[in-house]
Image (cartoon, helix red, strand yellow):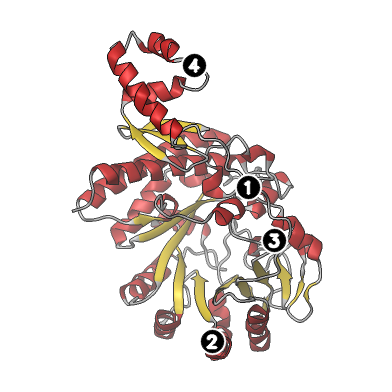
Amino acid sequence: MVHQFKQNGYALAVDVESGSVHLVDDLVYDIIALYPGREEEEIVRNLADRWPAGDIREALTGVQALVDQGLLYSSRQAGISRPATASGIIKALCLNVAHTCNLNCCYCFAAQGTYKGEKALMSPETGRRAMDFLVENSGSRRNLEVDFFGGEPLLNWSMVKETVAYARSLEERFNKRFRFTLTTNGLLIDDDVIDFTNREMDNVVLSLDGRKETHDRFRVTMGGSGCYDIVLPKFLELVRRRSRGTYYVRGTYTHFNRDFVEDILHMADLGFDEISMEPVVSAPDEPYALTAEDLPQLKEGYERLAAEMLDRQARGKGFRFYHFTIDLEKGPCIYKRLNGCGSGTEYLAVTPAGDLYPCHQLVDDPDFLMGNLWEGVTAPHLAEAFAQCNVLTREDCQDCWARLYCAGGCAANAYHVSGDLLGIDPVGCELFRKRMECALMMKAAEAVNPAK
């Protein structure tokens, strides 16, 4: 399968199976579109009104060479099949240390932090047991990942610090290395939080939706007031003092800010150079839900963002947008391309009570309860179900050119939209494909005009 598109003056052809990306001229672009199943003379006749026959034949020789090398119209890679079973090796935990929040965001998938249950905080004892559980089930893996999540994890800050200290005490004894991430809405950030995260957190995710009017539409306090003016100075100070690890500001856009590019550029203008902006996932009847009718404007927005980023980069004012970051030289291994994040197999979410779920987005559904920290995984059928949940088993993915970039997409999003772990989120898929086109176009532009 070959996917072709033109954007920002560049013509590209993506060979799906080999992963090869070709920056071509208009003649080769037209030949590639006609190539499969046609003889040379037929292609020449089809293009004779636009191109000299000699040029067509010469270009055809080059196209055929790419085909012969397995870089164009390549066949599906042999020997790739779905995993037969879950390995039982766990490399990452998401600790929901607080099933409560100090904001009242109506678009929150976690039901304002409570996950449709009672408010709860994880105890230090449960946090320590989570670290022991991860070590015990990590096999020979040395690098382990722990996300502190909520609700709002800073509402349980002392527990977070105790858990990190305990994990550090295990590293030398068991030859492990913990990498920590903290996601926060920012209300409780202070000097202690900044200093500790700078010292111990490999990544910090800061929730900011963009412009003041955008952010304050949904991210409101329990009293109904917007929090932009409170959190922005705290985020700026944390980033200013960040001397190790990474960070990014992460926003959510909805039907109400289909001009989300303005929010991204606003954050870049504030000085943030690591930015993510996610489309909201919600029931289709919510007033803020994205719809198929929104897609043309949203796709145009991504194209505009890519062009603007290239322009800023050329002027020395570049920034990174999470969804346009792609590695064409190395990239993820084939296992990662097929299986994605590893939810339910390599990655589990932990509730304040110590229950295990396949993903933080499924914690509110008892059908996905997999076990607990003390007894381990007691519902192995769920682990097996998630092991089979990959790009090869999703029928709707088989004819998608971007399937090896997204690994089939988020199982939780697919489930919430379609009711099936092996389903898809159609709007999300359309947006992902457009983001990939933009990312590939930017790679082409960088190849033609490398940074000095």
Q: What residue sits right under mark 1 in the picture?
A: 79
Type of amino acid at the residue the image marks with label 2: Glu
Q: Secondary structure at mark 4?
A: loop
Decide which of 324, 149 is in the foreground and name it.
Answer: 324
Given this view, does label 2 or label 3 mark the residue nearer the observer?
A: 2
Other-residue count near label 4 (Cα within 10 Å), few / some / many at <14 / 14–19 / ≥20 = few
Q: Earlier in the sequence, mark 2 or mark 3?
A: 2
Q: Look at the numbered discs 1 and 3 and tell me whether their residues touch, using CB distance below 8 Å.
A: no
Whichever of callouts 4 and 1 sits on the residue coming sooner in the sequence is 4
Query: Is residue 82 or residue 168 the one in the foreground?
Result: 82
Q: Amino acid at mark 4?
A: Arg
Hey, what amino acid is under mark 1? Gly
Q: Quadrant of residue 302?
A: top left
Left or right placement of residue 377 versus residue 148 in this view = right
Can residue 72 be seen from the camera position used here?
Answer: yes
Tell me how far mark 1 sits from mark 3, CA to CA.
Answer: 32 Å
Check residue 346 in the rendering and tell me which mark sits there, or answer none: none
Residue topped by disc 2: 171
Which numbered disc, 1 or 2, marks the residue that appears first in the sequence?
1
For mark 3, what is the residue? 362
- Image height check: is 99 above or below 443? below
Q: Earlier in the sequence, mark 2 or mark 4?
A: 4
Q: CA distance from mark 3 to mark 4?
A: 49 Å
Mark 1 or mark 2: which is in front? 1
Mark 2: few/some/many CA within 10 Å (<14, 14-19, 20+):
some
Q: Secondary structure at mark 1?
A: loop
